[in-house]
Image (cartoon, rainbow, N blue to C red):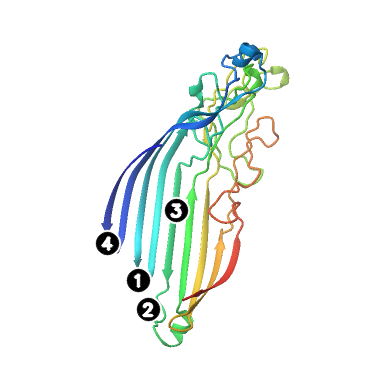
Amino acid sequence: MEAWNFAVQRSLPFNLAWEVAYVGNHGVDQPANYALNASTTLGGNQASQPLFAAYGQKAGVDDRYVGYSSMYNGLQTKLDKRFSGGFSMTMSYSYQKAMGMQSEDSGLDYYIYARRNWRRLDFDRTHTFAASYVWELPFGKGKRMMSSGLGAKVLGGWQLNGILSIYTCNPITFGGDSSVLHAPGNNNTLNWFGPGPIQVTHGTGRGVNWFTPTICNFNPAKGALVTTQCFAQPGAEQNPAGSVPEFGNLGRNVINGPGAWNLDASIFRSFDITERFKLQFRGEALSAVNTPRWGNPDTGIGSATFGQITGTSGLGSSAVGNGARTIQLGAKLIF
């Protein structure tokens, strides 16, 4: 792994510190599962599998591992409020892009023109924002307000905490029919017939379309022709359909799924038992606003739910990844 970064830091009034940085890295010879018997000839069928031609081997044979490259570039900025006056805060934002030939050591999708594998990685998130805070309320013993009396007993010892996360989602691939390639071991994607990009409507919720799921029709015997702003399997536009091996014109990870946000919040109350011992009661709400984190839409063109969001993602900062609220109560003895 080759890594580099450049950062500028600046102290600001009110105990603030601001930092902005460029961060980059280059993955060198990252291991990939390489299919030695994948065809390297479009339309070559079984005869084009290298080990079949040499030894009559039909089954797949994998080489673990062959090295390939990856690349990350990101703008990262952070604003810190150092703890003072009972309050601290950190806010950070990243604008980034991760590219590579394969995701999570999974192997290549294409062995015909292998550069076609270069794409946004599955875990890439373009925008990520996070903010956290700790606020000790300014009441009670040793504080600047209501330091004694009934007000100190009622309002003293309270602390509020929170973590806010906002991020765009991972990218989406539209998988297509690989059998039309007649090239064993290679994957495929769908065709998109524009003009223009895929129409993302950003609808969220179960059964709601995230993108316009129009499917092309090139056969007048099946009804009205639909030849623009639509998806189709590779070769569907041919006459007869699929007569010539064809890669879909979409790359991998071409649009983003739905983003998400989450707030984890907590409230603490501390009581002095003695000068040495302190008892703290804690109430914590993970995903406090009970906001669902929708999963990526269905990209199977033959599915009845093509284009629709069918569930939650299972990702997030809280213990319950789908966004369901969880409340925990506890006590802590501090000495």
Separation of marks 2 and 4 at Cα, in angstroms: 22 Å
Label 4 is placed on what type of residue? Pro
Relative to residue 66, is residue 143 drawn left or right?
left
Q: What element carries label 4?
A: loop
For the residues bearing labels 3 and 4, Cβ distance under 8 angstroms:
no
- Tell me the quarter of the picture where residue 38 sits: top right
Separation of marks 2 and 3 at Cα, in angstroms: 29 Å
Q: Write down the residue under mark 4.
A: 13
Of the numbered discs 2 and 1, the one sitting upstream in the chain is 1
Which residue is outermost to the bottom?
149
Where's residue 275, x and y in %?
43, 83
Label 1 is placed on what type of residue? Gly
Of the numbered discs 2 and 3, the one sitting upstream in the chain is 3
Q: What element carries label 1?
A: loop
Separation of marks 3 and 4 at Cα, in angstroms: 22 Å
Label 3 is placed on what type of residue? Ala
Q: Write down the residue under mark 3.
A: 130
Of the numbered discs 1 and 3, the one sitting upstream in the chain is 1
Of the numbered discs 1 and 4, the one sitting upstream in the chain is 4
**Above or below 58: residue 170:** below
Q: Write down the residue under mark 1.
A: 85
The crowding category of the residue bearing disc 3, from other C-alpha atoms within 10 Å (few below 14, some 14 to 19, many at least 20), is: some
Relative to residue 201, is residue 236 drawn left or right?
right
For the residues bearing labels 1 and 4, Cβ distance under 8 angstroms:
no
Q: Write down the residue under mark 2.
A: 143
Relative to residue 59, is residue 18 drawn left or right?
left
